[in-house]
Image (cartoon, rainbow, N blue to C red):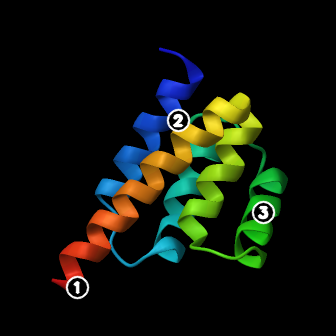
């Protein structure tokens, strides 16, 4: 599977089973990307959290964009952001209905 496909699948898995918003995902993102897949070092992950918190928008979407771009360039950022924002919108719509 391509790196882009792995990113899409990983964010789908994390987003589908996480309740509580972007901050609730931070521990799962760290476990998946730092400990399991070893795609990021702990320092890189902490940088990502700082950047995701300081830029406008949901933390989960900003994190997805950062990780996707770092690992697979523009295609990775697009796949990760698309998956993350789709789950964010669908869960928001379900709770607001």
Mark 2 — residue?
A: 7
Mark 3 — residue?
A: 46
Quarter of the rendering containing residue 20: bottom left
Tell me where residue 79 appears, x and y as whole percent. 52, 38
Above or below 53: residue 11 = above
Q: Are marks 3 and 1 in contact (CB under 8 Å)?
A: no
Please name the residue shown 37% across and 45% down the image. Answer: 12
Marks 3 and 1, the one that precedes in the sequence: 3
Marks 3 and 2, the one that precedes in the sequence: 2
**Element marked by disc 3:** helix
Marks 1 and 2, the one that precedes in the sequence: 2
Q: Are marks 3 and 2 in contact (CB under 8 Å)?
A: no
Query: Is residue 84 rendered to the left or right of residue 47?
Result: left
**Distance of label 3 from label 2 (alpha carbons):** 19 Å
Q: Tell me the crowding category of disc 3: few under 14, some 14 to 19, or many 20 or more residues within 10 angstroms, Cα based.
A: few
**Distance of label 1 from label 2 (alpha carbons):** 28 Å
**Element marked by disc 2:** helix
Quarter of the rendering containing residue 46: bottom right
Give the mark toward the camera: 3 or 1: 1
Give the mark toward the camera: 3 or 2: 2
Mark 1 — residue?
A: 96
The furthest residue to the left? 97
Q: Which is more toward the observer, 60 or 46?
A: 60
**Element marked by disc 1:** helix
Tell me where residue 22 appears, x and y as whole percent. 50, 72
Q: Tell me the crowding category of disc 2: few under 14, some 14 to 19, or many 20 or more residues within 10 angstroms, Cα based.
A: many
């Amino acid at each position: 599977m391509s790196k882009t496909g792995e990113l899409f699948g990983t964010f789908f898995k994390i987003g589908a089973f996480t309740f509580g918003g972007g901050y609730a995902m931070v521990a799962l993102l760290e476990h998946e990307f730092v400990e399991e897949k070893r795609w990021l070092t702990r320092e890189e992950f902490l940088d990502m959290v700082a950047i995701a918190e300081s830029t406008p928008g949901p933390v989960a979407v900003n994190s997805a964009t950062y990780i996707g771009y770092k690992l697979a360039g523009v295609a990775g950022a697009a796949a990760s952001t698309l998956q993350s924002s789709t789950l964010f919108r669908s869960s928001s719509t379900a709770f607001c209905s």
